[in-house]
Amino acid sequence: MRSLLRLLALALLPGVAAAQFPLRVRVVDQESQRPLGGALVSAIGMGSQTPAVLASGDGTAVLRVPAIGAYRVLVRRIGYQRSEEHTSELQSHHDLVCRLLL
């Protein structure tokens, strides 16, 4: 029984380890620099796209990317132009500010 549980735990580890790197995004209005909550934020790179995350009231969203690498961060919000930002090579964590234009 124990060996079966160990085997099951090992089988689940790749899925858990796959989303280990936080990419923190802060969305602000380009002119006023005020935070924009309610923006949809996602990242594309390393052969995958993260699910879209809704930015909180203070404009922050935390994406979990599957690997260290370079990503394109896509930000959309009603009333603003779509924004696309490119990250440099991610390390263990990364902070990025996205400025949206009306």
Image (cartoon, rainbow, N blue to C red):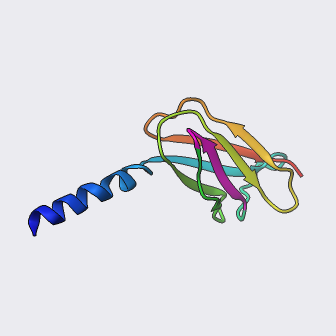
Q: Is residue 44 above or below residue 37?
A: above
Which residue occupies 75% across, 42% down?
84
**Residue situated in front as seen by the camera: 46 or 64:** 46
Where, by quadrant of the figure, is residue 56 drawn? bottom right
Which quarter of the rendering shows the N terminus?
Answer: bottom left
Relative to 49, 80 lies left or right: right
Magenta stretch: includes residue 95: no
Q: Is residue 44 magenta?
A: yes
Side of 75 relative to 70 (left or right): right
Considering depth in this image, is 11 or 20 the residue closer to the camera? 11
Q: Which residues are magenta?
A: 39-47
Task: Say left or right for 40 vs 3.
Answer: right
Farthest residue, direction left: 2
Taking the spot 67% from the left edge, 44% from the top edge, the residue there is 73
The residue at the point 67 percent across, 54 percent down is 41
How many marks overall? 0
Residue at the top extreme of this rendering: 89
Q: Is residue 84 above or below residue 88?
A: below
Left or right of residue 19: residue 6: left
Q: Residue 38's spot in the image, x, y percent?
A: 72, 65
**Which residue lies at the image location 71% right of the left edge and 39% below the top edge?**
85
User: Where on the picture, by quarter, is residue 95?
Assistant: top right
In percent of width and height, residue 24 lies at 56, 48
Expressed as whole percent of the image width and height from the top left, the position of residue 19 reads 45, 51
Per the picture, the main secondary structure of the magenta-coloured stretch is: strand
**Where is residue 54 drawn, in percent x and y?**
65, 63
Q: Nearer the viewer, residue 39 or 18?
A: 18
